[in-house]
């Protein structure tokens, strides 16, 4: 049985010292081992940005895609090989700016894929510009007088789009984050885990201390019911999207793959894809 160390490779991450993404990587590796996966049964697909490098730092199948396109690749991979556990990953710019359209449709599609977003509320790789998650008044190189745009709430968007698993955590709380990723992997359907992952180089506002002051931890609220969608949305809005924990889960809805008629559980590589002359002729006849 694989352990945490089996999901490590010899590639040293080149994130800035103190970056929250180190903890996200460790949480993914620990969660994969805890749910009983083997490295050859896990695929990590990432987009562009500091967070996009994560697919090369985990000992599993990895693909570093293009900006905002991690989810289409991850979903195609899952359709080709249902035997793989597929994790898509990226940053808030990757998932909530150029890739937002893909994010919304992946959520409503409910394919059995886990999406982990490293939310640092800034564009880090391109040296510190305002992102869709930056607060109003946020001053960066692209908004030197302060951003005049509203802040996008991924949690509200996820629930509105029909998400069946919504969670949020903080990179400093690796115990909670690992547990949430475990539950996300085990969830039958699309799961999104937004992670507050501070950028220590370019974001001097949303620091570790800032998050510790503003986070509302659901683990401290024993009466909270994550199966109540309306209550979840209300809680998100009441706390200005600063909730951490399992926010919502619907176990009743079947994943996309189970709804596709005739979709076999075996990977395409293991299926006999040959067709008879009669079947070929019938296919050709449909186009005449």
Image (tube, rainbow, N blue to C red):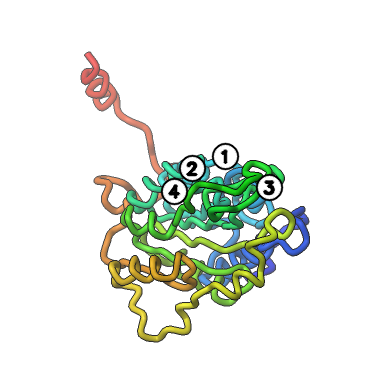
Q: Earlier in the sequence, mark 1 or mark 3?
A: 1
Give residue 208's position: percent from left, percent from top.
66, 69
Q: CA distance from mark 2 to mark 4?
A: 19 Å
Residue at disc 4, secondary structure: helix
**The image quarter in which residue 121 lies:** bottom right
Residue at disc 2, secondary structure: loop
Front one among 247 and 177: 247
Give the residue pinned by disc 1.
67
Residue drawn 42% across the image and 60% down it? 155
Viewer-nearest of labels 1 and 3? 3
Q: Which mark is residue 99?
A: 2
Front one among 98 and 193: 98
Viewer-nearest of labels 4 and 3? 3
Residue drawn 67% across the image and 49% down it? 124
Question: Which quarter of the rendering shows the N terminus?
Answer: bottom right
Q: CA distance from mark 1 to mark 3?
A: 17 Å
Kindly check if marks 3 and 2 are in contact, taking CB atoms under 8 A apart as contact: no
Q: Badge 4: how crowded within 10 Å, few (<14), some, or many (20+)? A: many
């Amino acid at each position: 049985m694989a352990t945490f160390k089996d999901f490590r490779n010899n590639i040293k991450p080149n994130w800035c010292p103190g970056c929250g993404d180190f903890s996200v990587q460790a949480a993914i590796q620990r969660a994969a081992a805890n749910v009983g996966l083997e490295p050859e049964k896990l695929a990590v697909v990432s987009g562009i940005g500091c967070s996009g490098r994560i697919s090369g730092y985990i000992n599993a199948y990895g693909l570093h895609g293009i900006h905002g396109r991690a989810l289409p690749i991850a979903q195609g991979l899952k359709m080709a090989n249902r035997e793989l556990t597929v994790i898509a990953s990226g940053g808030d710019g990757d998932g909530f700016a150029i890739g937002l359209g893909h994010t919304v449709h992946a959520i409503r599609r409910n394919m059995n894929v886990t999406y982990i977003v490293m939310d640092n509320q800034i564009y880090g790789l391109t040296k510190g510009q305002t992102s869709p998650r930056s607060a109003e008044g946020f001053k960066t190189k692209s908004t030197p007088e302060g951003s005049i745009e509203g802040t996008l709430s991924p949690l509200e968007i996820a629930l509105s789009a029909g998400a069946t698993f919504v969670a949020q955590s903080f990179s400093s709380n690796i115990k909670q984050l690992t547990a949430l990723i475990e539950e996300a992997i085990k969830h039958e359907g699309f799961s999104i885990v937004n992670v507050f992952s501070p950028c220590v180089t370019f974001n001097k506002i949303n620091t570790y201390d800032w998050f510790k002051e503003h986070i509302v931890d659901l683990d401290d609220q024993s009466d909270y019911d994550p199966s109540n969608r309306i209550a979840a949305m209300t809680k998100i809005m009441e706390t200005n999207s600063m909730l951490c924990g399992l926010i919502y889960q619907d176990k009743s809805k079947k994943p996309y793959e189970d709804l596709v008629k005739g979709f076999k559980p075996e990977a395409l590589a293991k299926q006999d894809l040959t067709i008879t002359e009669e079947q070929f002729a019938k296919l050709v006849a449909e186009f005449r």
